[in-house]
Amino acid sequence: MANKKATCYILNVSHAMSLYPDNVFSKSLQTITCSIEDRVLAGRKTDLVSVILCGTAETKNSLAESTPGQYENISVMTPLLMPTVQLLKDLSNVTTAKESDKPADGIIQDISLLDALIVAIDIISTHCKHLKYTKRVVIFTDNKSTIDWLDLSDVSEMLKSNSIEVTLVGADKKELESPDCSEVVKENYEHWDKLIGSCDGDIADLEEAYAQTQIIYAKEVAARPSYRGFLYIGSPYANTNFLPISINTYLRTKEISLPSTKKVSSLSEGPTKKVEQDTKYILDIENEGEQHTSEVQVEKHDIQKGYKFGKTILLVSNEELSMSKLETRKEMSIIGFVPSKQVPRQYLFSNAVVLTSGIVRVEQSSNALATLAEALYETDRYALVRFVSNDGAQPKLGILLPELNEISPILLYFDIPFDQDIRKYKLKTTVAPRDVDSESLALMSDLIDSMDLDLMDEDFLAPETIFNPIAWRFKTAIKTRALNENAPIPDLDKRFDDQYKLNPFIESRINDIEGKMLEHFNIRKVQEKGKKRAFGQINDSEPVSMDDILDTASSDSRKRPNVDTDTLPALIQNKVEAIGLTVPVEEYHAMLARTDDDEDVVEKANKLMHQVIITLLNRSFGNINYKKAISCLAALRKTCAAEDDASRYNSIIQEVKSWCTLSQLDSPRREIWTMLKENGLGMITNEECQDVDIKDVTKEVAEKFWNEIEEKEPETENNDDDERFDADNLDDLF
């Protein structure tokens, strides 16, 4: 199997590693842990890891067992295996050795680091043998300890013969540049440089290696073609005159998916918690003379597919399905060429696919693709193609568009929708283009100019530096929870601030324009309304007045509990659920005063009061219910103005105006219209209420409400030629 890897990490755990002021050992351990975490998350069986600790009090390796007295103080945590979460947990418990007695000359004794490298070579050569592996040893250590370099040449030959690369991550590499660097450090680095130079390795600084593990990077994807075949100019199945071009296609863009979850059981006590899904089909059969039904299991091969045709299920057998299936053959054929302006950008809804030359006549195919791409670019056209990925697959309609780069022109493929895939909506604009004033256009132009990203650094929000924050947080949470089940979900890294927060430079440029736009467009902040709202929560300065209660007669017993006394507290205590026609105002205020309801009591009470008002008017014999309807409207208007629900009242009062039939001069309903004027129950203006839904209802607009003859707006031409017949409206024709 190709791309197999074998990596051995050697970590110096001697006490000297804990003496550095900048926590060298912790950074070394964290660098190894981060590297292994990525491998565990990827879950590749061919990416093997081994961890070796050098400088431990105990000895645990195969070479020490076979040759007593040698390779001591070296412990192999794990042989070359696929890394697991248990290895990460074991690494989190690794610490440096305890402080030992220092020698009289002050020089730290040999830590057998070269012996640890020999142990790593033995582990790799034993497991990989002569198979094709990418073999590597990574050493994390300092160089202030003396090392026995007598076997340097032998170790170098072992590395060459086994094709093993060595990377040294030095905790004190920067000391080489200092004039006060000790001779021991210089000598060790000279020998390391000689050894690593013989096996094409590298020497890195610990800070640089640690910083590399903190970088967010994109996963490298193996270049596997998504389609192998021919691009035909002219279909080979329709005529004999066609030109085949050998192609391979590769996905350029594809939406990243989060790690998939597995179904496991929390009750399992064995080595595995995996849960297998078992599906069975049950048929309910009614037994004669019995009320209950019996269940009979049906085998899968006895089940047929059915399609709904209205309320009828139409059964279709597998044979009939196979006969109705469209027979297609694998191809990508150019149907024709269209101007690029005829293909809207929103129709490119699929992933981008790059076309390259295939394995047949590579040079000629490459020239043909480049020539076609350049010709499409010069003529400003796209190629319309019919694409079938495999024999029997569903045909797709796509386009080939050209892209010029520094190397050569290339072709990109995109799926485009069929007519049934396109959602055709008729959306109304808030303002006609001809009605846009010059000041608005100037403000918007200034806003766009001030937020131009070309004024900032070229790397700001560059595609190569924008990563998916959800994927990063998801993977980081999995890594953290694997080591600590009670760890909190990590916050987003500050490196994602550019995607979520306005850049300070841009913010400073738009401050002046922001104020002008708020004033010009009369923009106000929308007050969010919670799911549950009690009366008086928005405007506490205007509480409910007891003087608004006209009488306390009994309410309709069919809609609320019986009330023993004629007081508002009694209504509240009985928990009014509805508003009757007898004492609607009292019950309306009683419902508003409730605090035990999970619903928005203001919205609920206003809806019920609306129904009561319309019912009173429709059931009124003459003007018998007019006064009661007026008192309901007065209570509703006051509440709606106080609770930012003015748009509801304005629509209700318009409905009442329509009910008055003012177009008939002798209409008896004009009496209530007169009563509305006398009580001032017109529309609520934007000066009386902060409801953003009535920001356009000025005093002038409210005054026009009292005009009995309304001005008709000119009718706009409505072209419904594109509308299609809706089968759901068929019943309306009868």
Image: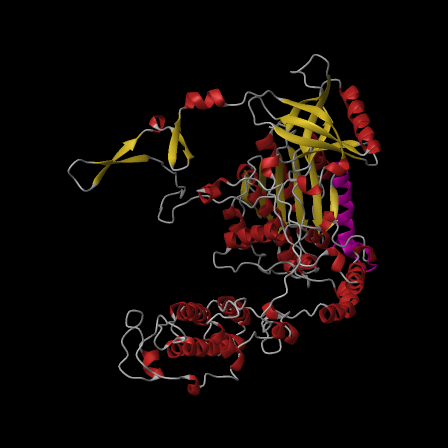
Q: Observer-nearest residue: 664 or 433?
A: 664
Furthest residue to the bottom?
547
Q: Is residue 171 above or below residue 116?
A: below
- The location of residue 128, given as percent across then percent down, is 60, 31
> Which quadrant of the figure has residue 342?
top right
Instruction: Considering the whole magenta stretch, tell me its main secondary structure.
Output: helix
Residue at x-position 54% and y-position 79%:
677
Q: Observer-nearest residue: 243 or 640?
A: 640
- The location of residue 192, given as percent across then percent down, is 74, 44
Q: Quadrant of the N terminus?
A: top right
Q: Quadrant of the C terminus?
A: top left
> Which quadrant of the figure has residue 630?
bottom left
Examine the rendering and report whether any part of residue 200 can be seen.
Answer: no
Give, as a single range, the part of the protein colored magenta.
172-200
- The location of residue 38, given as percent across then percent down, is 60, 46
Q: Is residue 204 above or below residue 234?
A: below
Q: Observer-nearest residue: 638 or 303?
A: 638
> Which quadrant of the figure has residue 156?
top right
- The location of residue 347, given as percent across then percent down, is 67, 39
